[in-house]
Amino acid sequence: MNASYEPIRIVNWQAAILLWFQNKADILEEHSYQVRSAMESFPLPAVLRLKRYVKPWANGEARFSRDNVFLRDDYICQYCYKPFPTSQLTLDHVLPYSRGGKKNWTNIVTACKCCNHKKANKTPREAGMPLLKEPVPLNQRASQPINKRNKDQLPDIWKPYIFI
Ligand SMILES: [Zn+2]
């Protein structure tokens, strides 16, 4: 949810954990099951509220920015398919900048530092590093909006927060 308590987006659990770890969101509800890492285990967040208000996107398309690229890619490196904290993530030009690659939604993807270094000045095909998914602009339609149609499929724990 936005800081205004307005439901805005469904994110996967890795993105939810990262928003919390990075102190960008408060956890309002937790699932009864736990996530385990090597060192500890903690409850999986079910409802998060952003600490800072995010402006709704004009024309359904989000502003092109580093944070929005990470959000579109669910904080997952598009070359090794693993989630990372933002401090470990970089923006990678799919077609390298030195070869005319543009800085836009369809040529910039999330990459961990290691993969970015490994891919270097190559295309994904040349580097033998296929992209997890085709990069497209982040828009509200693609981000699984919470609406009446899918209301019945939503977890019960979300329902008190959804005013539809
Ligand atoms: Zn990677």
Image (cartoon, rainbow, N blue to C red):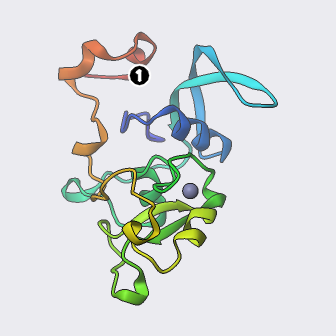
Q: Is mark 1 on a helix, strand or loop?
A: helix
Q: Nearer the viewer, residue 62 or 69?
A: 69
Task: List x then y, in percent, for residue 112.
Answer: 58, 60
At 34% from the left edge and 17% from the top edge, which residue is drawn?
154
Quarter of the view holding residue 11: top left
Quarter of the view holding residue 144: top left
Would you say 85 lies left or right of 3 here?
A: right
Would you say 129 lies left or right of 149 here?
A: right
At 66% from the left edge and 59% from the top edge, which residue is drawn?
87
Task: List x then y, in percent, for residue 152.
Answer: 26, 12
Q: Nearer the viewer, residue 161 or 69?
A: 69
- The quadrant in which the N terminus is found is top left
Asked if residue 54 can be seen in this view, the reply is no
Ligand 1 is in which quadrant of the figure? bottom right
Would you say 6 lies left or right of 50 here?
A: left
Quarter of the view holding residue 37: top right
Would you say 32 lies left or right of 57 here?
A: right
- The quadrant in which the C terminus is found is top left
At 41% from the left edge and 15% from the top edge, which residue is drawn?
160
Q: Mark 1 points at which residue?
A: 161
Circle 1: residue type: Tyr
